[in-house]
Amino acid sequence: EVQLLESGGNLVQPGGSLRLSCTASGFTFSNYAMSWVRQAPGKGLEWVSAISGSGATTYYADSVKGRLTISRDNSKNTLYLQMNSLRAEDTAVYYCARRFRELTSDAFDFWGQGTMVTVTS
Amino acid sequence: DIQMTQSPSSLSASVGDRVTITCRASQSISNYLNWYQQKPGKAPKLLIYGASTLQSGVPSRFSGSGSGTDFTLTISSLQPEDFATYHCQQSYSTLMYTFGQGTKLEIK
């Protein structure tokens, strides 16, 4: 059974840092690209960042470029999101999601339960 | 960047109704369009990918159509468990995704 379990969410002051983790099980982690998606309270979903299966290639939304860094440790089946220079607008539930890809399809087929990040003074 | 616009933002309907939600892309995305269902306090769940392919285990009352810039999600006969928020997502730009703003489906 595929499982994704996020951790690391917390209350942090503006300008502070936090590292989120997503531990995967039930599939060959290194075979799949992964993403972080966030949802601010009462708002829609916002894709944040993605990383290839090997970890060699990363992608970021413009809103987080230069402040958030995605990485992975395939030996530990774990995805990370290092969050620096946090702002109030980064307050959200952060989900990790597995990329599912077919010939002409590309979607997120499994999601974690989410971890809450609150940026406030 | 590709922008995704859903309509309506919210919708009231009754059990048994047929419901349609639309999603428009700011440029052609072929059929790289996915639909997710999200219930309060829960993670999103993949319903439809590639504009029209039903994810395994999703009831057949859900269907998707469209290509290019205009897409629809249809629920043929609403069930009580279908009241949720629905999100569209483009995946045309490799590993650079965008979501619509969501459509909240409420009980009338």
Image (cartoon, coloured by chain):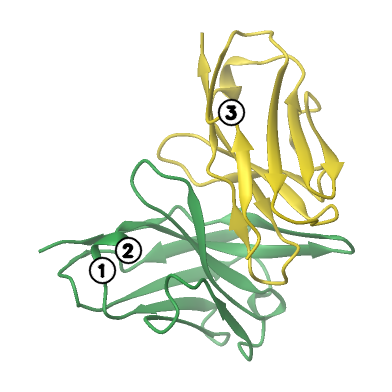
Both labels 1 and 2 in a single chain: yes
Residue A90, quarter of the rendered image: bottom left
Instruction: Report the amino acid beneath label 2.
Output: Asp
Percent across and percent down for residue A44 are 47, 46
**Going 74% across and 35% down the picture, which residue do you hit?**
B58
Does the image show residue A118?
yes
Q: Secondary structure at mark 3?
A: loop
Instruction: Report the amino acid beneath label 3.
Output: Pro
Residue A34, quarter of the rendered image: bottom right
Q: Residues within 10 Å of mark 2 (few under 14, many from 20)?
A: many
Does the image show residue B56?
no
Residues at marks 3 and 2, CA–CA distance in whole angstroms: 26 Å
Name the residue furthest bottom.
Answer: A56
Q: Nearer the viewer, residue A105 or A90?
A: A90
For chain B, the rendered hue is yellow
Q: Disc count in the image?
A: 3
Tell me whether the residue at label 3 lies in contact with that at label 2, contact meaning CB atoms closer than 8 angstroms.
no
Tell me whether the residue at label 1 lies in contact with that at label 2, contact meaning CB atoms closer than 8 angstroms.
yes
Q: Residues within 10 Å of mark 1 (few under 14, many from 20)?
A: some
Residue on which disc 2 sits:
A90
Position of B6 compared to A116: left or right? right
Chain bearing mark 1? A
Tell me whether the residue at label 1 lies in contact with that at label 3, contact meaning CB atoms closer than 8 angstroms.
no
Chain bearing mark 3? B
Task: Please determine whether, in this image, residue A37 is positioned above or below residue B36.
Answer: below
- Residue B8 is labelled as 3
Residue on which disc 1 sits:
A87
Colour green belongs to chain: A
Percent across and percent down for residue A61 are 51, 71
